[in-house]
Image (tube, rainbow, N blue to C red):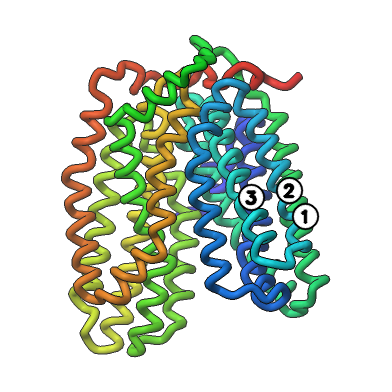
Amino acid sequence: MISPKMWWTQNVPRSATQRRFVLASLIDSAGTGVHFTIFPLYLILIVHISAVQVGTGLLLASLVGMLMNIPVGRACDLVGPRAVLALGYAAQALVAGLLILIRDVVAFTLLVTLGKVASQAVRLGRNVLVAGAGGDQRNVLRAQMNASSNIGLAAGMGISAIILVDASPAAFEVGFLINCASFVSAAVVQCWAKVPAKVPATAPRDRAGGRVRAALKDVKYCSVGLLNGLLGFHQQVFFLGLPLWIAAHGGVPRSLTSLVFFVNFVLTVLLQVRASSTVHNYRDALGAWRKSGLWLALGFGILAAFSHSSPWLVALAVVVMGTLLTFGEIWYGAAEFELSVALAPRTSLGLYQGVFELGSDAFAMAGPLLATLVCVSMGQAGWATLALVYLAFALLAPRVVEWAARGREQAEQPLDQAVTAPGAGAAA
């Protein structure tokens, strides 16, 4: 049993610098929770953009954002992650403030594309700073941020419910302004965090882009990033494929979706930091990967086995699967950040973070269509396929990590010396 005092001790860092990142994550995600809930309805009810146009615009924005991973990551190494983070937040705040001016699909596409690129800048800049601020406890700090992010998202969605009661243009504008303010506040909190700035060597400004080519040709590291995207695909299945399957099944109450999501929220908030605190290097991370794959395979296998049973048994299988997938998600979260940092060269951490995220972004783009196909169209066969895929992942993916780590002496070196590049030193 986890008491409130124990949870607070585990989830709130003692370091003032680390607390800044946790607080900023809470603030940022609260605004995001408001935005994600109200923005689609604003487009449909107020601007009258069709669902197809919205989907097309979001797909284009995701593609551009993925292509910008490499230049944004390289910028973190050259000008410093703090500058990239601040610029990204400024662009996000600008986009949030301009959303009320959308009148057609062109304006919508341009703004969401700029917003996607800005969010990539925030994500990569923050990752590099967190790697330095957390030192050999970076994975715990990242987990603490994830826990606070879940709480912030829940709070933001609660605020959005108040906005949607009115659903007037003025109410939507208030929601967008809340999101804008969250970006500004999160930037102020994080950009003044005192992160050490002692780097073993600085990233040279090679005009020929040699480092970029070398990173993209790093087959070992790219393979780990791609496998991380495959493992992360379970979130698309959980948050999109499962609700669609429940709605199409007809034999179980649709309210099961809310129950499963609630269980997921509670367990991740309670257990994410505890799981991540056991991961200190790439060897620990590959063990967490194995656990994640096994939990996911077991969860999908259970639903495959009972998806054509009596309604009450199907409902029970859904709840059990949702719980098992949550454990898989927790171990996935415990490994992801550690692998992305531990296997990357210290002087190109930003660039390699951008490369690592390509796998996740590729699966995120294909995820909605793929999750719908596997979970709804294929049904029981789809759940069985997912079980086999993640069982194979649990058996084979850790070997890929060992292969990628071979010859990289820095893989186990604690990152207690900051990884920030020039221009990202401690604020006065």
Secondary structure state at the residue bearing disc 3: helix
Q: Quadrant of the C terminus?
A: top right
Tell me where residue 58 appears, x and y as whole percent.
54, 60
Secondary structure state at the residue bearing disc 2: helix
Residue 418: quadrant of the picture: top right
Q: Earlier in the sequence, mark 3 or mark 2?
A: 2
State how many labels appear: 3
The answer for how far apart the CA atoms under marks 3 and 2 are is 9 Å
Tell me where residue 102 appears, x and y as whole percent.
73, 63
The answer for how far apart the CA atoms under marks 2 and 1 are is 6 Å
Residue 309: quadrant of the picture: bottom left
The crowd level at tag 3 (other Cα within 10 Å; few <14, some 14-19, many 20+) is many
60 sits left or right of 305 in the view: right
Task: Tell whether label 1 touches label 2 (CB within 8 Å).
Answer: yes
Name the residue at the top extreme: 201
Task: Tell whether label 1 touches label 3 (CB within 8 Å).
Answer: no
Q: Which mark is residue 115?
A: 3
The crowd level at tag 2 (other Cα within 10 Å; few <14, some 14-19, many 20+) is many
Tell me where residue 152 appears, x and y as whole percent.
62, 56
Q: Is residue 95 above or below residue 305?
A: above
The answer for how far apart the CA atoms under marks 3 and 1 are is 11 Å
Task: Tell whether label 2 touches label 3 (CB within 8 Å).
Answer: no
Q: Nearer the viewer, residue 218 or 149?
A: 218
- Residue plotted at (42% across, 68% down): 240
Pointer 2: what residue?
93
Q: Which mark is residue 97?
A: 1
161 sits left or right of 209 in the view: right
